[in-house]
Image (cartoon, rainbow, N blue to C red):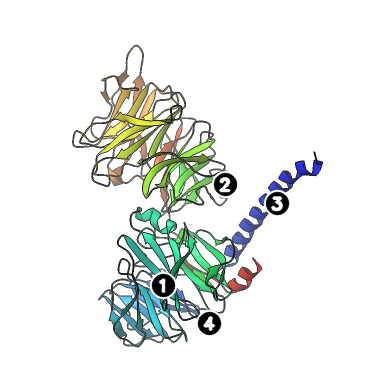
Amino acid sequence: MNPNALLRPRFLLLFLVLALSVTVLVTAAWQAAANTFLLPQDQQFTNAGRQLLSISPDGSQVVYVANNRLNLKALSSPAPRVVSGTDSGAGITNPVFSPDGKSIAYWSADQTLKRVVVDGGTPQTICQAANPYGMSWGSDNMIVFGQGTRGIQRVPAGGGTPETIVTVQQGELAHGPQILPDGDTVLYTLVSMALPPALAWDNGKIVALSLKSKQSKILLEGGSDARYAPTGHLVYANAGRILAVPFNAARVEVTGKPTELLAGVRSAIPTTGTSQFSFSSNGALAYISAATAAAPNRQLAFVGMDGNVKPLRPISSAAFGPRISPNGKQVAYRDGAAIWIADLDSNAPPRRLTTTEPGEAPVWSPDGERIVYISIFNNMEALFWRRSDGTGTGELLTDRARAPESWSAVHQAISYITLVGPSGDAGDYDIWTYSLRDKKAGPAIVVAPSAQSGSRFSPDGRWMAYESNESGRAEVYVEPYPRTGQRFQISKNMGSRPVWSPDGTRLYFDNNTGAAVRMMAVDIRVQPQFTAADPVPLPVTGFVQPGGTIRRQFDIAPDGKQFLMMIEAPAVRPGIQIISNWFDQLRRR
């Protein structure tokens, strides 16, 4: 055997590690080099479900929506000013500059598109329109704008009757149109409304359609809000990241692989596929960080049984369902439509686990080697798993499944909820299990017509705790597993989302009261027979756990002495990041 053949895998691994490290370092360096403009103390971004900002073509000024009006910040000026004429108090979205930078078009809550000169004045009505799904103002002095299920329309910037230039099929939605330099091709995002909104946008298709031939083709899959850059790239968004891919505008085709440029950029998902960034013709970039999303911001923290709080690291206000690893060193959670893994002992950037597919509701395997989660199979939610180190790809376990909840090492089984009723949290949820040994799924706890959820195998595998609303309100129960007909009600006056202590001698749950949420504890004995003491309130309160949701927003640490929780942190003053030479750096990538 050629000895060099043995070395090649090591060199390849080293190369990949170094390449990834360089990518992370360069991305971090770009973001660190950004200049930050903080909004005045009395301003907050408003109507964040649509585009909030736009940078002028010459990169000299930024317009943004705050306090329901347009505000203009010249990069050479220390303070912004209100664009007079837009301060009526009505809702405003989707500001875009004219190609000469002298005017701004936007949508107004009176259901019209309007334009106003940057110096302010009486706005001119362009046309009637619903709140756009993205908008752009082309060099032909035409404005193109998304109308969701009604496709894409365009209208002369001087005013007129909108013309529909792109239609969509039933169950589809169009977003973020832009006319490419050939004047014939419209670039836009197409999403399927069959997917949950939190997943649809990051699973979107970037499409190019010829207005002359009416022929369309898919350029990319797995993102939204694409924009053409004169560097020869398509720049688009996915799960809070901004990516770029080489693009030949003359042939209208992608010519390379995507590269991540920025992370932690604020998006409007699930309302729309908008990502809050804008770049000028000469290469300046303006964007809003996800860290300056709607106040308050959040932190992950260890919270002791005595209520003592130890903050660990900041976390996005969109983070959902944190689950601690078996060794207590990492946390997995959903943010946007992806699953992320973050260290608990550092502020290192989180690592995205689901890179090619959407994902939510992560649960660690008992050995920490795998994570089971929900993704999409045949346009429906299904149970997947993959290695927690990010290697390999997601593998389908069983379809028609909702959130995984617990993983028993004893039974080599995963409990999860499946929806058999109408829809949403008010539906008829049942608890099912999937056997990793038998490769089969089947019902575990079914009490029709009510909702069961929050299932947790006991550490010894003999019991299952869960929540049910069969009595008309949420209560916590325990049954033997597999079922024998015995059942014990644990909570006395509402209870939700149970977790066992690692030794199985205590059961914890919250009192399901929203803003006044509090953890409760119940001592459990299983010998000589199952008995449960009365619930005792713990001095653990004020953590993030919305009432009414069936998903648990906390976890218990492996040592059994503390909870991993999300807590509200002081608000970060909102601002806009500006990188002046972004195109130069993009070309060097």
Residue with the mark numbered 3: 15
Q: Position of residue 487 (x, y in %)?
A: 26, 23
| Above or below: residue 145 compared with residue 524 | below
Q: Nearer the viewer, mark 2 or mark 1?
A: 1
Quarter residue 448 falls in? top left
The answer to which of marks 4 and 2 sits earlier in the sequence is: 4
Figure quadrant of the N terminus: top right
Residue with the mark numbered 4: 58
The answer to which of marks 2 and 3 sits earlier in the sequence is: 3
Other-residue count near label 4 (Cα within 10 Å), few / some / many at <14 / 14–19 / ≥20: some
Q: Indicate the secondary structure of the residue bearing disc 3.
A: helix
Task: Identify the residue shown where x is 23% and y is 45%.
Answer: 422
- Is residue 574 something one can see in this rendering? no
Other-residue count near label 3 (Cα within 10 Å), few / some / many at <14 / 14–19 / ≥20: few
State the separation of the CA atoms marked 3 and 1.
Answer: 38 Å
The answer to which of marks 1 and 4 sits earlier in the sequence is: 4
The answer to which of marks 4 and 3 sits earlier in the sequence is: 3
State the separation of the CA atoms marked 2 and 3.
Answer: 25 Å
**Amino acid type, label 2:** Ser
Residue with the mark numbered 1: 177
State the separation of the CA atoms marked 1 and 4.
Answer: 21 Å
Can you name the residue that lies furthest to the left here? Answer: 472
Q: Tell me the number on the disc at residue 346.
A: 2
